[in-house]
Image: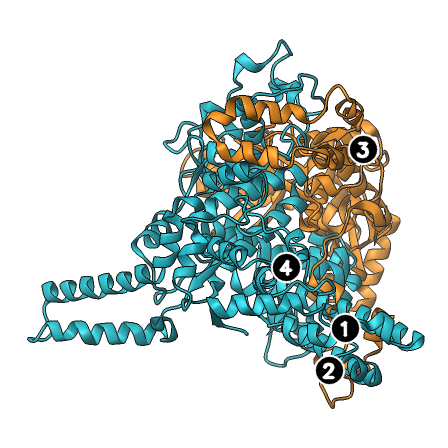
Chain colours: A cyan, B orange
């Protein structure tokens, strides 16, 4: 069931699944966890077990309002719906159609294309001109392959029904979710090619998961409303983002290449259109008197992404571009309050905080308020967004994800070694190597305490120490000890630990299941599956519930670890 | 010493005194002294003589620099103290302690430099002490060292450890308390405290969330089909309910971007002084900066630059406990962050590296897992 599948197969499976009763524990555990980072997505497709540990009600597909409600699952899905849903997923890029070239590794593919192209040059590829011609040829071939791969997607996107605004229109017309829509729908396009093979597009899934994760991060650091605005921004931005990580072998279409090299940005209006109307943008920001706010700083435009220097981030908030009047020093005057909407209140200050007396707020007013959230995000230390032009916003994913990694690392250090441990490692991260004497002074901690903490952290592998003898006889009292924090190594280590912990959870699960073998054996019986409560004896049923509980706990833990892994490795 | 020399000596000393009135630690090289226009130019012999006399009278203290010899001026009152000294040893010892200034001199160091007997040194120190010229003190850097300092000056802040030390011990309770003062100051000045009054109004039946939808429908409908449809498809209660329940409690909110009044180090210092929390220990700005740095490293506070103004604000402001005087150590100080490795028992496991199937410990029989699953 993993990997790729023909559409007809998928539909057949889905029907079958709905005739079957809810899978029991054994069914659930065995195939649900597939060690990929796409639970949400294949959940929607393959799985609707109520007691599935990963079934976290994610209706979120690509944030542009394509809802795949769980409610649908209660009534057996119609084949039409499956096609339709699938078409939506393909159009959104979450599911992709498989072509034979995908089974080749990108390197091989490139090699074979190069081989083919080389035959066009019977005289061999020599000389600058010929080489550049050859390269251009190879490039265009690769692009053609990329374009061919997304052909179905393009077709579906073009079949006007899957334009976001049209989905809405259709919903309006039907007054309900997208079912039973005959005619030239995306579903019918797929139906015409029942042998199309599809698979999950992990690259795109990762982008969506990263968005979710970043929105959570914003929720944690700034606030709920702001995070919702951020999610809207990411959703609109990431329509043009196809993967999280690129390497030289990634096969891209021309359009993908453009968005990769030139970066993507969205306008305030686009963000607003993606914002659900449930979000009340007027809350979540405090009030300050107008004279305390300098719009020139709040609205500052940063045209260029921050430079990543080694592991330290030189955010654009740093001294460099603080000089007023430099070329880069621009601010966005559109941020000034639309005076027409003040409604006789004392300026705009009254609008952000604890009030909403003027009831119906206009679109301009709402956009204004939403912008305030975006500006806060831009101002944050993490640089959630970059205000890259008048009313234009972008996200520098690289540095931001790096921030995210450090945040998780800090969380772990603080959890295991307390605040002081965190303090010491952060000092080392900022200052590089420090000796035994400076550290306690900087951390304002007692020397013995520092030593105990450092030793603890060294044992756990978070810190390292370098010994520099002052003379030839390496006596301990004539040796300087320099502590340091090897970031790259620590990040790798944490990733390893996450994997190991995952394995241990699985191991434990196996043991627990073995211990409850008598229950599991009963559950494997076809007549018991789905009727556990009626068929099982009281005490056995209790044990069964315990087992289910434990399984949930362990598997959800695995999923959390998996989230961590994706932060450290995939995003 | 004839009259002329004596007069010249007085003149030179007075000129030097004047030259270093702004900076008492100024050093004079030979060129500096010639440039004072007291000695006839090129009369090196005279200069040498005068310096010799002044040095003998302890009014000049020679200092060895990389570039050569230089002299520091010694006030007359200090120079007079040398006259009280009765033995050569005392003079030598006192010279070293005098030169060490506020840092103080280590007894072992004195001994090594003078290359004298322990007894002689002890005797000399004893005599100096009875004359109230030197006192013994301890430095925080090494409590066991016997340190000596001139009786009329206080040990340097490096030796006493500044305000953070009380009787040579790091006063952790004091630091902790001050940290929480700084923290609450930053929190209060750099965030908005929402008292939840809003909820009462926005919950009133007159003012339902409809407003949002109307607004969207009227103007936005023209431009954006999507929003309108969205609004209509779920046009009811859930929109208002969560917002209301949330705003009812008191929470802290971030301030709008471009806020200029995040407190700076100076303001925090002034705030602490005004609050009179550290009465006995006047805190200077650099000390407050140390406290702020700690909070930054602890991930509690972040620096925010607005032009040349460097302010500080609390991180994760919405997760901060709104109670004004919660201590940093309190559990409810803020919600700690969590991730997969902090919740799984393995994250904190002391035997993580030993754990394997068939090993001394393994997940199947792990007691941490037992506790966690129970």
- According to the picture, the residue beneath numbered tag 4 turns out to be A76
Of callouts 1 and 3, which one flags the residue occurring earlier in the amino acid sequence? 3
Provide the secondary structure element on which disc 1 rests: loop
* A269 horizontally vs B313: left or right: left
Using the rendered image, report if marks 4 and 2 lie on a common chain. no
- According to the picture, the residue beneath numbered tag 3 turns out to be B250
State which chain disc 4 sits on.
Answer: A
- According to the picture, the residue beneath numbered tag 2 turns out to be B355
- According to the picture, the residue beneath numbered tag 1 turns out to be B349
State which chain disc 2 sits on.
Answer: B
Q: Are marks 1 and 2 in contact (CB under 8 Å)?
A: yes
Real-space Cα separation, disc 1 to disc 3, in angstroms = 37 Å
Which numbered disc, 2 or 3, marks the residue closer to the eye? 3
Q: Position of residue B103 (x, y in %)?
A: 71, 50
Q: Position of residue A329 (x, y in %)?
A: 42, 30
Real-space Cα separation, disc 4 to disc 3, in angstroms = 46 Å
């Amino acid at each position: 069931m993993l990997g790729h599948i023909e559409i007809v197969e998928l539909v057949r499976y889905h029907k079958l699944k709905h005739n079957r009763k809810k899978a029991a524990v054994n069914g659930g555990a065995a195939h649900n966890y597939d060690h990929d980072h796409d639970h949400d997505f294949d959940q929607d497709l393959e799985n609707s077990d109520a007691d599935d540990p990963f079934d976290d009600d994610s209706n979120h597909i690509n944030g542009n309002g394509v809802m795949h409600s769980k409610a649908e699952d209660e009534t057996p899905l119609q084949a039409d719906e499956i096609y339709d849903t699938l078409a939506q997923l393909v159009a959104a890029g979450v599911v992709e159609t498989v072509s034979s070239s995908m089974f080749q590794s990108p390197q091989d593919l490139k090699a074979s294309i190069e081989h083919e192209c080389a035959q066009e040059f019977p005289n061999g590829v020599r000389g600058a001109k010929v080489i550049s011609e050859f390269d251009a040829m190879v490039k265009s071939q690769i692009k053609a392959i990329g374009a061919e791969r997304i052909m179905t997607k393009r077709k579906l996107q073009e079949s006007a029904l899957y334009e976001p605004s049209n989905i809405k229109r259709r919903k309006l017309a039907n007054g309900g979710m997208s079912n039973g829509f005959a005619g030239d729908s995306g579903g019918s396009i797929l139906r015409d090619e029942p042998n199309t093979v599809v698979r999950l597009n992990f690259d795109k899934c990762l982008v969506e998961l990263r968005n979710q994760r970043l929105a959570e991060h914003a929720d944690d650091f700034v606030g709920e409303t702001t995070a919702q605005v951020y999610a809207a921004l990411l959703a609109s931005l990431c329509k043009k983002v196809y993967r999280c990580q690129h390497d030289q072998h990634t096969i891209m279409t021309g359009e993908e290449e453009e968005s990769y090299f030139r970066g993507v940005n969205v306008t305030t209006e686009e963000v607003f259109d993606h914002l659900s109307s449930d979000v009340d943008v007027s809350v979540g920001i405090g009030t300050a008197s107008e004279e305390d706010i300098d719009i020139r700083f709040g609205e500052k435009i940063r045209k260029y992404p921050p430079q990543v220097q080694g592991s330290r981030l030189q955010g654009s908030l740093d001294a460099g571009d603080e000089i007023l009047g430099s070329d880069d020093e621009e601010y966005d005057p559109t941020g000034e309050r639309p005076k027409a909407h003040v409604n006789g209140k004392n300026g705009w200050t009254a609008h952000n905080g604890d009030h909403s007396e003027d009831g119906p707020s206009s679109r301009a007013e709402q956009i204004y308020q939403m912008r305030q959230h975006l500006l806060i995000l831009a101002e944050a230390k993490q640089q959630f967004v970059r205000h890259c032009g008048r009313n234009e916003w972008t996200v520098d994913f690289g540095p931001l994800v790096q921030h995210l990694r450090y945040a998780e690392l800090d969380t772990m250090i603080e959890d295991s070694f307390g605040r002081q441990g965190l303090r010491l490692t952060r000092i080392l991260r900022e200052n590089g190597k420090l000796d035994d004497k400076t550290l306690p002074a900087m951390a304002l901690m007692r020397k013995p305490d520092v030593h105990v903490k450092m030793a603890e952290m060294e044992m756990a592998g978070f810190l390292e120490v370098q010994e520099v003898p002052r003379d030839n006889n390496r006596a301990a009292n004539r040796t300087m000890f320099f502590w340091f924090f090897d970031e790259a190594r620590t990040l790798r280590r944490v990733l390893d630990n996450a994997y190991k912990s995952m394995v241990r959870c699985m191991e434990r699960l196996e043991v627990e299941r073995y211990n409850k073998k008598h229950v599991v054996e009963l559950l494997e019986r076809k007549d018991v599956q789905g009727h556990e409560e009626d068929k099982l004896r009281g005490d056995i049923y209790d044990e069964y519930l315990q087992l289910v509980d434990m399984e949930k706990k362990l598997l959800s833990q695995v999923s959390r670890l998996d989230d961590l892994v994706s932060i450290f490795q995939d995003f | 010493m004839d009259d002329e020399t004596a007069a010249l000596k007085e003149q030179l000393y007075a000129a030097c005194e004047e030259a270093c009135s702004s900076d008492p630690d100024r050093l004079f090289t030979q060129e500096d002294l010639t440039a004072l226009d007291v000695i006839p130019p090129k009369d090196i012999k005279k200069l040498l003589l005068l310096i010799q006399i002044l040095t003998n009278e302890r009014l000049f203290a020679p200092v060895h620099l990389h570039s050569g010899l230089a002299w520091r001026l010694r006030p007359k009152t200090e120079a007079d103290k040398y006259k009280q000294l009765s033995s050569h040893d005392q003079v030598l010892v006192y010279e070293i302690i005098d030169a060490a200034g506020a840092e103080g001199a280590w007894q072992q160091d004195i001994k090594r430099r003078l290359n004298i007997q322990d007894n002689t040194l002890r005797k000399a120190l004893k005599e100096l002490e009875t004359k109230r010229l030197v006192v013994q003190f301890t430095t925080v850097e090494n409590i066991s060292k016997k340190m000596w300092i001139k009786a009329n000056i206080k040990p340097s802040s490096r030796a006493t450890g500044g305000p953070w030390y009380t009787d040579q011990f790091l006063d952790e309770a004091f630091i902790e308390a001050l940290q929480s003062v700084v923290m609450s100051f930053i929190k209060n000045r750099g965030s908005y405290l929402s008292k939840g009054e809003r909820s009462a109004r926005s919950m009133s039946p007159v003012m339902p969330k409809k407003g949002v939808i109307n607004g969207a429908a009227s103007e936005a409908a023209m431009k954006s089909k999507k929003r309108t449809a969205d609004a209509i498809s779920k046009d009811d209660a859930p929109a208002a309910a969560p917002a209301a329940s949330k705003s009812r409690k008191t929470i802290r909110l971030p301030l709008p971007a471009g806020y200029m009044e995040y407190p700076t180090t100076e303001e925090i210092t002034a705030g602490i002084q005004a609050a009179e929390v550290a009465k006995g220990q006047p805190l200077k700005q650099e000390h407050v900066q140390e406290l702020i740095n700690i909070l930054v490293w602890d991930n509690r506070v972040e620096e925010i630059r607005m032009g040349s103004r460097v302010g500080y604000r609390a991180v994760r402001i919405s997760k901060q406990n709104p109670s004004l005087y919660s201590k940093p150590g309190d559990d409810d100080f803020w919600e700690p962050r969590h991730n997969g490795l902090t919740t799984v028992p393995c994250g904190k496991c002391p035997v993580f590296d030993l754990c394997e199937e068939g090993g001394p410990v393994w997940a199947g029989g792990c007691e941490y897992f037992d506790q966690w699953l129970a």
